[in-house]
Image: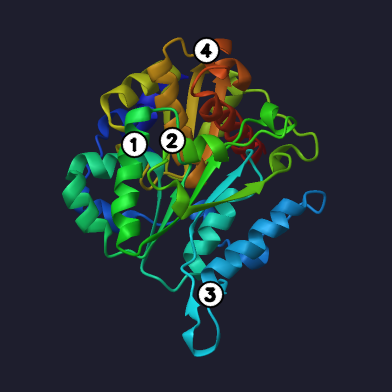
Amino acid sequence: MLALIVMSKALNPQIVDLKERNAPVDPVRLLETFMPPPRFAGVRFSNYKPNPAFSSQETAKTRLERFVLKETPHRGFGMFKKPEISPSLYLDGGFGVGKTHLLAAVWFESKLEKVFLSFAELVYAIGALGMEKAVQAFSKYKLICLDEFELDDVGNTLMVAMFFGRLIEGGTQVVTTSNTLPNQLGEGRFNADDFKREIQSIANRFESLKIDGPDYRHREGLSAPHPLSDAQLEQQFQAFAGVKATESFTDLNAHLEKLHPIRYVGLLEGLEGVFVTGLTPILKQDDALRFVHFVDKLYDREIRFAASGCEIPDLFLESYKHGGYAKKYARCVSRLGELLREATP
């Protein structure tokens, strides 16, 4: 298959060589790109479908609609009544309960000057610009929608908390999401207490919304499809008519190692399909985390993904699944399963 692919890359402009893409990023212009990704371009409150078995989903939707409409309680009486500033919101729940859908709906339906980005993108922007310039650059936004607030790196968490503190003081509101591991949901354990402890300097500015329920990707007992054989993958690759790229898993990880994850969006620019040969368990945690970020970008941009090699749950070592980044790996397995089902003819 590799010989055919090398020949195809040379002859077919529809085939992209990822290893030749470095995708440089301009930190200043980067802010202009921060908006909901293509997968969530059409989401609104009206097409969010709460699971009727879990009332917290409908409650969260209603609260967020009120947030957008500024229907907040009032203090005082009569002519002295003053509007109460709506607190920033923290959406806490498991994978696949619609948190990102609701977050994107807030962004689309709010009339405020706004920005939508991931935690990793925000950390990069603050690091690239410096705290003072980042605060200045983001201060024009009155609403920040932040997907997947991460609590697994103390330094990044404190930096973002300080950043939010400066912006919230100036009138910016924040809506952010985070994940609770599926095996903690049955114990009634969510992350709100952890979140408020880690951002204690601004914790009183946030209201927590718990959103429980099963991963919608598994509601009908669906599991991740088995990876393809090399022959099946080659057949799918040759038949796919869109702009596409293919790499061995080894070469892909080697190239991802050379790029900051913020560049992965540019790496995938214009692609409609990515085909990867030879999935194997990832033995280095740094490689695993980079691949998780790469999958997030494939998923967000609805890029077709197909692969040969090991089973998806076997990509990540058991020790990873119970460590500090367990949430990332669980989300990645869930999203890879959905991507592979979407690619199944």
| 10 Å crowding of disc 4: few (<14), some (14-19), many (20+) | some
| 10 Å crowding of disc 2: few (<14), some (14-19), many (20+) | some
- The amino acid marked with disc number 1 is Leu
Coordinates of residue 185 in the picture (x, y in percent)? 70, 33
- The amino acid marked with disc number 3 is Arg
Q: For numbered disc 1, what is the local secondary structure?
A: helix
Residue 128 vs 336, above or below: the answer is below
- Please tell me the numbered disc located at residue 158: 1
Q: Are marks 4 and 2 in contact (CB under 8 Å)?
A: no
**Residue receiving disc 4:** 281
**Inter-mark Cα distance, 3 to 2:** 30 Å
Q: Earlier in the sequence, mark 3 or mark 1?
A: 3
Q: Are marks 1 and 2 in contact (CB under 8 Å)?
A: yes
Q: For numbered disc 2, what is the local secondary structure?
A: helix
Q: Earlier in the sequence, mark 1 or mark 4?
A: 1
Q: Are marks 4 and 3 in contact (CB under 8 Å)?
A: no
**Residue receiving disc 3:** 75
**Inter-mark Cα distance, 1 to 4:** 32 Å
**Residue receiving disc 2:** 198
| 10 Å crowding of disc 1: few (<14), some (14-19), many (20+) | some
Q: For numbered disc 4, what is the local secondary structure?
A: loop
